[in-house]
Amino acid sequence: MSVTFMEPQLHSPVLLKETLEALNLSKGSRIIDGTVGTGGHTYAILEAITPGGQILGIDTDPEALSIAKKRLARFEEAITLVHGNFSTLKGIAELNDFVPVQGILLDLGMSSLQLSSSRGFSFQGASPLDMRFNPEQDISAGDLVNTATENELFRIIHEYGEEPLAKKIVKSIIDHRPITDTGRLVQAIEKVYGNFRGHLHPATKTFQALRIATNQELENLHYFLPQAVNILDKGGRLVVISYHSLEDKIVKTFLSRESRDCVCPPVVIECVCHHSATLKSVNKKVIRPKPEEVFINHRSRSARLRIAEKL
Ligand SMILES: C[S@@+](CC[C@H](N)C(=O)[O-])C[C@H]1O[C@@H](n2cnc3c(N)ncnc32)[C@H](O)[C@@H]1O
């Protein structure tokens, strides 16, 4: 399949060629893009499925959606954009008369638009410590950092950030409260790392952890997966690009379970679960970006793509 998407881009869609192939698109397909962002993948999918095809595009960030809307204007007839959370995928799809579908895509994490915004995702400069994908959500990263207990903050930074110095960082954060902006949070982290000269900024892991917790990213993925299987047509494809080992583990475990007829624990001699496989994995090995892509788009370096087909 040739990829003709050459528009100026705010966010370079990761693993674009691989994603288009994974979705097994044809003219007339109905596809859900659960993470439209600024529309990079969506644009290329629309080129492949129109005329005749339709996309339901979802994003929880209204700012991203309004950019996507302008960028995708030439496909106006073929696209429905919804401000919503993919954790309620089935409801959104039913409400928009979009069941069943031949493909569902999730491209997880944040976009370059969000990273370069002044919404607290970046540790460069000082901006309000917000980090909400959806500004209508109640709790921001600032609320979390200033009100969570020491144990809760440790769990977040240790588990989601895989930060080896989580314990010391949490103590420093508590000493630096109130944390009024990203600059103050960076100060608290730098206090622990001292004159750090590695290639990864010492705040990287803590910022990632707080973003994941603020947006309940892992919980949303858990809710999404069974709903996606439910609304896929027979032979339809589920395609997920993740950027964090915990996200990929959730997807891998789900696909492996849904690819088996019996999911009883090994100690059970005769099946009692009566589970039937709903999916088959299309790629046994996870798909990673080629070095050429990582060279051009550094953000793609941690991407992992998994594909499954509805039985
Ligand atoms: C990596 S970006 C997607 C980029 C997009 N594929 C493109 O090519 O422009 C991830 C997007 O997912 C959105 N997002 C994250 N969690 C979400 C959720 N639970 N529901 C809906 N959108 C979500 C973010 O707001 C962000 O715009």
Image (cartoon, rainbow, N blue to C red):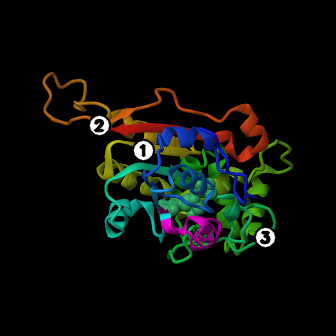
Kindly state the secondary structure of the residue where label 3 is placed. Answer: loop
Q: Amino acid at mark 2?
A: Leu
Q: CA distance from mark 3 to mark 1?
A: 39 Å
Residue highlighted by disc 2: 311
Q: Which residues are magenta?
A: 56-77
Image quarter where the N terminus lies is top right
Q: Magenta part mainly helix, strand or loop?
A: helix
Answer above or below: position of 195 versus 85. Answer: above
- View quadrant of ligand 1: bottom right
Residue 281, percent across and down? 40, 32
Does the segment drawn in magenta span residue 86?
no
Residue type at mark 3? Ala
Q: Seen from this angle, which residue lies furthest top?
A: 269
User: In the rendering, at what x and y percent does residue 180 appear?
Assistant: 70, 75
The amino acid at mark 1 is Leu
Which mark is drawn over residue 108?
Answer: none
Q: Which residue is mark 1?
A: 238
Residue denoted by label 3: 126
Whether residue 153 is visible, yes or no, is: no
